[in-house]
């Protein structure tokens, strides 16, 4: 089909075309990540981590358990970021064991086999 400059061809909208557009819009809406405030209890999550000794409160970044330093989150946003990462992994079908392993051995995270299950359990209970 040829058109004159500045003239655009008309598009024919069919029932199948509208159905496809609607399905695409729904898929995009379902695929978008959920925010913590959309259904999660961020305060409950932070309180659970704090009760387990995983929040720093501006002091030492170590939670000493049996003489071993286990890292602490410097603040709520850092803890929340990790919790939301756990939720994305759960939504992607990863197992508890694989997520806990990644938290324990991941680059830039608190490498602690003590902290990882606490983070996972708090995230799945309060955020996901």
Image (tube, grey):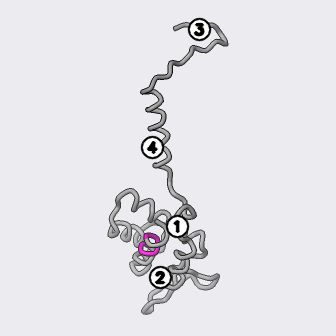
Q: CA distance from mark 1 to mark 2?
A: 26 Å
In the displayed structure, 21 sits above or below 100; it is: above
Measured as percent of width and height from the top left, residue 54 is found at 52, 81
In the image, residue 27 above or below residue 2:
below
The residues bearing labels 2 and 3 have C-alpha atoms spaced at a distance of 69 Å
Q: Secondary structure at mark 4?
A: helix
Indicate yes or no whether the magenta region holds residue 116. no
The residue wearing badge 1 is 40
Measured as percent of width and height from the top left, residue 20 is found at 44, 32
Q: Is label 3 in contact with label 1 (beta carbons under 8 Å)?
A: no
Badge 4 or badge 2: first in the primary sequence: 4
**Front-most of 72 and 45?**
45
**SS of the residue under disc 1:** loop
Circles 3 and 4 in contact, beta carbons < 8 Å: no
Q: Which residue is mark 2?
A: 70
- Residue at position x 48%, y 36% from top? 22
The label nearer to you, 1 versus 2, is 1
Q: Which mark is residue 3?
A: 3
Comparing marks 4 and 2, which lies closer to the viewer?
A: 4
Snapshot quadrant of residue 59: bottom right
Report the span colored magenta.
120-124
Judged by depth in the image, the label closer to the viewer, 3 or 1, is 1
């Amino acid at each position: 089909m040829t058109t004159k400059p500045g003239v655009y061809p008309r598009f024919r909208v069919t029932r199948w075309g509208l159905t496809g557009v609607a399905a695409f819009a729904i898929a995009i809406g379902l695929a978008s990540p959920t925010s913590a405030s959309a259904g999660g209890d961020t305060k409950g999550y932070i309180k659970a981590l704090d009760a387990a000794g995983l929040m720093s409160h501006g002091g030492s970044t170590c939670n000493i358990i049996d003489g071993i330093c286990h890292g602490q989150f410097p603040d709520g946003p850092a803890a929340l970021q990790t919790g939301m990462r756990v939720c994305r992994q759960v939504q992607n079908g990863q197992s508890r064991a694989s997520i806990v392993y990644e938290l324990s051995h991941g680059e830039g995270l608190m490498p602690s086999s003590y902290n990882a299950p606490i983070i996972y359990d708090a995230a799945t209970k309060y955020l996901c």
